[in-house]
Amino acid sequence: MALTNQLFPHLPLPMLKKTLLKAVHAAAEVIRGFDDQDFLVSNKEGINNLVTEVDHVSEKVIIQTIKDAFPTHDIISEEVGELLQDSEYKWIIDPIDGTVNFAHRIPICCISIGIEKSGEMIMGAVFNPFMNELYVAERGEGATLNDKKISVSKKEKVINACLVTGFPYTYLDEPNGPLQTFERFIRKGVPVRRLGSAAIDLCWVAAGRFDGFYEHKLQAWDSAAGFIIVEEAGGKVTNLQGEPYSPYQPGIIASNGVIHEELVQVVNHGWTS
C-alpha cells in the first residue's frame, strides 16, 4: 500500500522526497568536486577502514540540507553518529559508502540515505555520482533507477545465480564466518563478486544485475536505503537466519525472493546435495 497523503495527511511525503533528492545531489557535487584533487585520508578501527575529508564534507552538506527542511528530525550518520531529538522520523546516512574505493579512485561508491518513520523504512535513495546512477524507492511505490522502474531477477536456483558479498574490516573469527561461507559458494562454481559498497550491492540486486547478496557485518547506514530499494523492486531482505530484517542488526541476506530460502540454507548450513 502506498504511503499517500490521503492515508497519512500529517506526513509531508513530497517535501521528504524533495529534501532526500536535494541532499544526495548536494553530496554528489561535493564528491565530484574532489575527483581531480588530493584529499586527506585517515584510518578508523581496523586496517584499511578508511575515512576521507570528503566523507566529512559530504556528511556536513547532507545534514545541513535535512536540518534546513526538518530541524526536529533524528539523524544517524556514519561519521558523526547519532543526532537524536525524539522524532518519529529518522534519517540514516552514509555520506560515502565504499570509501576505500573512493580513496583509490575506483568509481564504485555512493551516497546512501534512508528515511525511517516510527521504525519503518519509508524512503531511500542511493546515488553513484561517477556512474550517474540514482536509485530511489518509496514504500508502496516501487523502485527506480534514473526515474525508470526496476525489478529483481527471475533466477530460480542458487547454483545458477550471480551473487555479491562483502567482508568486515575487523574479521570475526567465528564458526560459519565470511570466509567459510564464501568458500562454500566458490567451490560449487557459483560466481560471487565483491564490489566494496553494500549500498550498491543491494541496488544491483534490485536492478536484477545480481540475484542475491549476503554479508555478515553491516551498520545501519550501509543498508538502510538499499533495504527498501530491494523490497520495492520485488525482492526479499532478511537477516542471516531468514527472519525479518532490521538495519540495526549486523547480518543480511537480500535476493530476488525466488532463491531466498535456498540462499539462507546455503549461507547457514551448506548445500543439501
Image (cartoon, rainbow, N blue to C red):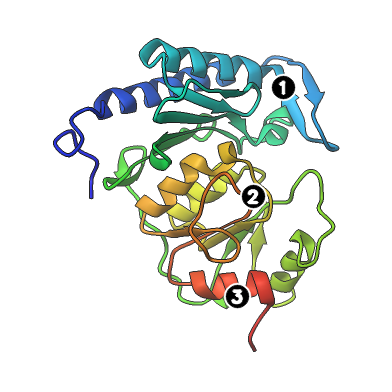
Disc with the residue nearer the chain's start (2 vs 3): 2
Kindly identify the amino acid type of the residue bearing the numbered disc 2.
Pro
Residue 272: quadrant of the picture: bottom right
Circle 1 — which element? strand
Q: What mark, if any, has residue 31 been given in the picture? A: none
Q: What residue does disc 3 label?
A: 265
Q: What residue does disc 2 label?
A: 250
Give the CA distance from mark 1 to mark 2.
24 Å
Q: Residue at x 82, y 50 (%)?
A: 171
Say above or below: 232 vs 98.
below
Front tag of 1 and 2: 2
Q: Residue at x 65, y 69 (%)?
A: 267
86 or 20, nearer to the observer = 86
Q: What mark, if any, has residue 52 been given in the picture? A: 1
Whole-percent x, y for residue 30 in the image: 55, 16
Disc with the residue nearer the chain's start (3 vs 1): 1
Residue 103: quadrant of the picture: top right
State the residue lying farthest toward the bottom: 273
